[in-house]
Image (cartoon, rainbow, N blue to C red):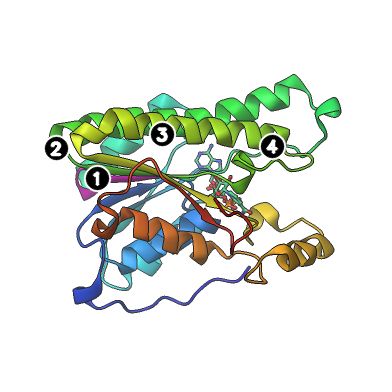
């Protein structure tokens, strides 16, 4: 997997100085790249992981070695008690969370609808929506109290454009999109923004087993003529989290090199 080298971002140009961010599923892939980038931009970062503690510690180390603050916290985002404990631990150690990135990957089998088992469909839907609902439940009350906050969810281009074998993923991600729009509407009066980034095919562990021919064909369909990198998605998340995006809420931002145009 290709990863960007840590960059030095001068204090003057840091976009998230002293913001406290919690990123779910930040031990690998898009979440890890987002944690690193936000850390470079001055954010204090809670790096959630589930099974990959050493990888999460590497992400923390890459932030702290550049002078930033971060901690790794284990929690299964589908479990409300673990999520509550994680949010409490981050708040006690790093400060009150003002930015939440909902990113943890809910795995699913790829199969045509006629072969899809209800159990797999249900697990994907519930995994995706629990992973958004419980972290939001845990952080929104303090955001309302402080009258500021920012929530960014990582959806998928497949939430709007279906793909063969992706019936569960498409359905779950479109539910996530609707959930975030509802939060944007209800929480806007409290100065809390909620937005979606929507990656196309991105080179991470989640796509590592796709045949190379599939990835090459996919890159050819991209107007910018390559597949996405985790850092591409991280850049879009950074922009939406920054004050420059202060009047953007309820938005759906494709990060697909032009595959998805709205
Ligand atoms: N890659 C793509 O082409 C692509 C395209 C569109 C959308 N997306 C979306 O982007 C997001 C990130 O995907 P990715 O490709 O970066 O995945 P990835 O490389 O497979 O990484 C998945 C991350 O999610 C964490 N995770 C999985 N289950 C978890 C759970 N129950 N609780 C907490 N953390 C959990 C993993 O933690 P551990 O390793 O610690 O278990 C890991 O940090 C997902 O929402 C995915 O649907 C990806």
In x, y percent, where is residue 168? Answer: 68, 32
Read off the residue under disc 4: 108
Q: Earlier in the sequence, mark 1 or mark 4?
A: 1
Closer to viewer: mark 4 or mark 3: 3
| Outermost residue, left side | 146
**Residue drawn where x is 19% and y is 34% of the image:** 190
90 in the magenta segment: no
Asked if the residue under mark 4 is in contact with the one under mark 2, i.e. CB atoms within 8 Å, the reply is no
Where is residue 139, by image quadrant?
top left
Indicate the secondary structure of the residue bearing disc 4. loop
> Residue 113 bears which disc, if any?
none
Asked if the residue under mark 1 is in contact with the one under mark 2, i.e. CB atoms within 8 Å, the reply is yes
Q: Earlier in the sequence, mark 4 or mark 3?
A: 4
Read off the residue under disc 3: 181
Read off the residue under disc 2: 146
| Magenta residues, start to end | 94-101
Measured in 3D between alpha carbons, the distance from the residue under mark 3 to the one under mark 2, in whole angstroms, is 21 Å
Measured in 3D between alpha carbons, the distance from the residue under mark 4 to the one under mark 3, in whole angstroms, is 24 Å
Indicate the secondary structure of the residue bearing disc 2. helix
In x, y percent, where is residue 112? Answer: 83, 34
Closer to viewer: mark 3 or mark 2: 3
| Neighbour tally class for label 2: few under 14, some 14-19, many 20 plus, Cα within 10 Å | some
Q: Is residue 214 visible?
A: yes
């Amino acid at each position: 997997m290709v990863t960007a080298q840590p960059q030095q971002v001068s204090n003057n140009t840091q976009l998230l100085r002293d913001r406290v961010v919690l990123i779910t599923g930040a031990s690998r892939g898009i979440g890890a790249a987002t944690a690193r980038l936000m850390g470079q931009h001055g954010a204090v970062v809670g790096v959630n992981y589930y099974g990959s503690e050493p990888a999460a510690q590497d992400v923390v180390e890459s932030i702290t070695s550049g002078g930033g603050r971060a901690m790794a916290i284990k929690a299964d985002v589908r479990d409300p008690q673990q999520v509550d404990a994680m949010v409490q631990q981050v708040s006690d150690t790093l400060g009150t969370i003002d930015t939440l990135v909902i990113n943890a990957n809910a795995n699913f089998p790829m199969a045509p609808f006629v072969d899809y088992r209800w159990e797999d469909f249900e697990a994907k839907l519930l995994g995706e929506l629990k992973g958004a609902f419980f972290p939001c439940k845990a952080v929104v009350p303090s955001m309302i109290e402080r009258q500021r906050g920012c929530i960014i969810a990582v959806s998928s281009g497949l939430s709007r454009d279906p793909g063969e074998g992706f019936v569960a993923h498409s359905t779950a991600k479109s539910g996530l999109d609707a959930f975030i729009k509802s939060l944007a509407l209800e929480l806007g009066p409290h100065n809390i923004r909620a937005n979606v980034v929507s990656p196309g095919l991105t080179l991470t562990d989640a796509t590592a087993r796709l045949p190379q021919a599939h990835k090459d064909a996919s890159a050819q369909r991209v107007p910018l003529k390559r597949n996405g990198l985790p850092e591409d998605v991280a850049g879009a998340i950074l922009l939406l989290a920054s004050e420059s995006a202060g009047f953007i809420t309820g938005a759906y931002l494709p990060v697909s090199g032009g595959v998805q145009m709205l």
